[in-house]
Amino acid sequence: MHYIRHRYFLVPAIIITIWLLQGCNGCNHTKTTPPVRDSVTTEIIKSTPKDTLKNWAEQRLIQWKGWIDSSMAGGFGTDSLERTTVDTLGSIDTTSMEVARFEQFRQFFVYSPDSSRVIDMVSYGNFLHQGTHGKVVLESGEPDTEVAIVNVQTKKRERILFTGPSTIIKQAVWVDDHTILIAGGTYDENNQLQPVIWKYDTNTKLLENWENDRL
């Protein structure tokens, strides 16, 4: 009989103990804080317009860079160029280029990646003649220089840049289907060559002028 009585007292005690343990487990669950993890901060370095132009100039404007380095005895770095002006070409001088003239200068044009447009920096004020071995040679006529974009299909010609005799346009390239770099140099009052790059976007019609910041 003592055994039975002891067993009856033991069962409620076990139930109460289980209930308390479950309750404590719930308390611990609500109060548990996640382990503290070491936070790692990743610094994202964004390219500036100056960095982008520097990379483009060194990778795409090889002919211009060689000319500048030779003329300035290596005393020039593309990182010295600063954006001095930004103009919106709202009213672009537009003409229709004759098909015969387009074909005449075709080999000197710079085609866009999709071949829909060309950069024309040769047809204004210049003429062609037969050189040695029958090779067509481009000969300069006018002292001024004009740079235009021509639609290959429609022959619509839009002037985007016009410079005087103190400026030489050496090279023009397409960065993509809507971005153009025009590179050259301007002789100052001391007859010193100063590098210059124009960047033009055919979508936004923005023309940026980048010059030596030491001027």
Image (tube, grey):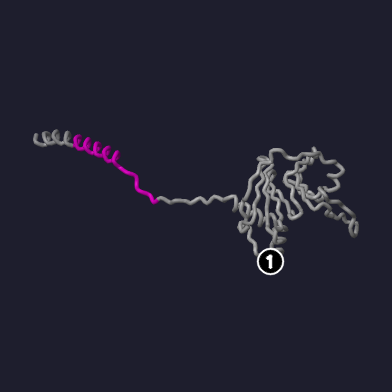
Q: Residue at x 71, y 38 (%)?
A: 91
Callout 1 amino acid = Ala
Q: Report the span colored magenta.
A: 14-38
Q: Is residue 155 magenta?
A: no
Q: Residue at x 68, y 66 (%)?
A: 73
Count of numbered badges drawn on the protein? 1
Quarter of the image with the N terminus is top left
Task: Name the residue nearer the viewer: 99 or 82.
Answer: 82
Q: Is residue 18 magenta?
A: yes
Place of residue 19 in the rendered image (x, y in percent of width and height, measured from the top left): 22, 35
- What is the residue that sits farthest to the front in this orientation? 189
- What is the residue that sits farthest to the bottom in this orientation? 73
The answer to whether residue 17 is left or right of residue 33 is left
Position of residue 194 relative to residue 91, above or below, is below
Q: Residue at x 69, y 38 (%)?
A: 90
Place of residue 81 in the rendered image (x, y in percent of width and height, measured from the top left): 62, 55
Position of residue 163 relative to residue 74, above or below, is above
Q: Which residue is mark 1?
A: 73
Residue 174 visible to the viewer: yes
Quadrant housing residue 157: top right
- Element under disc 1: loop
Place of residue 158 in the rendered image (x, y in percent of width and height, measured from the top left): 75, 41
Q: Main secondary structure of the magenta part?
A: helix
